[in-house]
Image (cartoon, helix red, strand yellow):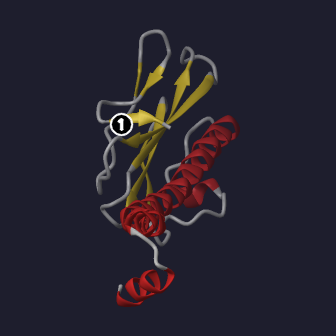
Amino acid sequence: MIVLAAYLRKRRLDKQAFLSLITPVLAAVIFFIFSIPYYAYDSQRQSRRADESEAMTYMGAINRGQQAFRLENDTFAESIDQLDLGLRSQTEDYEYEITISDDDMTAVTAVPKNGSRSSFVGAVFVVGDGNEIGTTRSIACKSDQPSQSAPSLPSMTEGGQIQCASGSSEN
């Protein structure tokens, strides 16, 4: 500040000139100070989304694997290894598990190892009467808030539509 004052005296600039020089500098400093928290938060949010995309990819692959398995075997797989997809049941960020596997439905959960991420549940339902193989429909639901427990299971309505349980949404 002292150097700036000496410069202004040497140049014989008045207060108006001083303000016109210092205002853009102050504006830039203030912008920088307020933008740091935003970029730090945005970086964390992007990292969480990347980790959650892994879970969504796994959920989709497992659901499709279950549909193919049922078409070939007339039953759902009881474990991820049985699907023979080359997927691990645990990664750095999530644990995956087939929790229900019966004649009409199967479900898989993705639970984060860190509580700052969302959890997921995927399900495949058999649609059609019990006398034929029937078609299948699948859904993947994400918890609305970060959670270390899986969302409740999705359900199928009378009209054959699948919907996520309360506290989760289709993703």
Q: Residue 121 appears in which quarter of the rendering?
A: top left
For the N terminus, the image quarter is bottom left
Q: Residue at x 66, y 58 (%)?
A: 85
84 to the left or right of 113 = right
Q: Residue furthest top?
A: 159
Q: Residue at x 50, y 59 (%)?
A: 46
Amino acid type at mark 1: Ser
86 to the left or right of 28 = right
Is 58 drawn above or below residue 36 in the view shown?
above
For disc 1, the marked residue is 168
x then y, percent, for residue 101: 45, 42
The foreground one among 18 and 92 is 18
Q: Residue 148 appears in which quarter of the rendering?
A: bottom left
The foreground one among 27 and 38 is 27
Secondary structure beneath dot 1 equals: strand
x then y, percent, for residue 51: 50, 61
138 to the left or right of 84 = left
x then y, percent, for residue 40: 41, 66
Is 48 drawn above or below residue 68 in the view shown?
below
x then y, percent, for residue 70: 62, 38
